[in-house]
Image (spheres, rainbow, N blue to C red):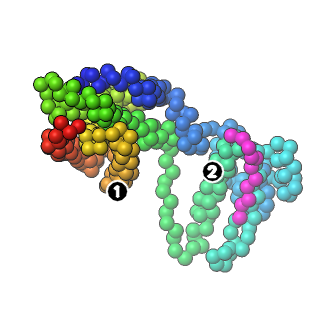
Amino acid sequence: MARRDIRSLSREKTIVLALLIQLFVAGFSSFLVVGLTSLYDPSSVAAGEVEMAVTGDAREELEAAAAEQDGTSVTAFESEAAAQRAFNQRQVDAILRGEYVPSTRGPGEQIQVTAVVPEGSIRSTLIVVEVRRVLSALERQERLERTPYLEQPPVPLPDTVSASQYFGFTYTILIPLLLFLPPFISGSVAVDTVTEEIERGTMELLRVAPVSLLDIIDGKALGMVLLAPAQAMLWLALLSTNGIAVSNPAAILLFITAVTVVVVTLGVVLGITLQNRRPAQLLFSVLTLVLFGGAVLLPEHPATTVAKLAVDSPTLLTYGHVGGAVLLAVTGYTVARVYIGRVAAEAL
């Protein structure tokens, strides 16, 4: 029964296309990460040398802040009109005008910066990122200089950490995405395999063999449960081939298998209960989205569990989530078998 259902997947074009897309992403992950990260975080892409014009009373402070940034050079202008001409003639990529204005929160002055950047191009986004870096450096610089004049010390800023944006994207988005899609695909296919047998009247033909309804559902569920971890193993192998190391693969596969059992159990129960593909698929999609979205209420989201295992930084809570998922899977499928065992097969 399990082999029959797995072979039938080759006729499901939507499922095959989804699998091929995942295969492509996993197989060419080292190339795709660069492009996807540029959309996820534009600051990960080098903008080249960005020339900025600085003007105004606070131009010296802006020059000092820009000097701390690699890939940014500044030219000071005495007047705003001269800076605007240089910008219009494309001699500079952006204008930063810094002025001292009265503070709105007490005596003293604060720096007000107005930025002018080009519009309508990808490079504009990268220039904005560089401008933001300069302004962040200015903020830190002013914070340090003005701290001695404050009545109370400000909240300390976290230390800057030199880390690759690709690392965060890969382990917090790409790997969880690849590993959680197969369970949901398996659950969706489980709904189809059960409801199609009922709608086509072939469930009765299957029962001609010396098997019960529970045996039939077990076979269908087994095929779908085995499919997801098999895909996950392949994705992990392809990621490793692309130079993306994934730690604790056994724990990850155990967790993904447990999630798959939960999702497939939901699928077969809905299929047996509703006996109609369209409402069963709709309810399955809604419930899986609700369950996965509601997982944010857990002490640790399932995607976080996978990410921590992948980067080899699991905690006791992480392993507790893996164990809890296994317990939920076993309990859920046991309850489902009791329910299915009480269903009258003749009524299907």
The quadrant of the rendering that contains the C terminus is top left
What is the number of the mark on residue 133? 2
Left or right: 134, with 59 as reference point? left
For disc 1, the marked residue is: 297
- Give 313 or 54, whichever is nearer the viewer: 313
Left or right: 43, with 155 as reference point? right
Check disc 1 and give the amino acid type. Answer: Leu
Residue drawn 62% across the image and 60% down it: 139
The answer to whether residue 156 is above or below residue 310 is below
Residue drawn 49% across the image and 66% down it: 155
The image shows residue 37 at horizontal and vertical percentages of 54, 38
The answer to whether residue 108 is above or below residue 176 is below
Q: Is residue 215 visible?
A: yes
- Disc 2/disc 1 C-alpha distance (Å): 34 Å
Residue drawn 40% across the image and 34% down it: 178
Q: Residues within 10 Å of mark 1 (few under 14, many from 20)?
A: few
Instruction: Please check the rendered image and state whether residue 276 is part of the magenta-colored stretch, yes or no.
Output: no
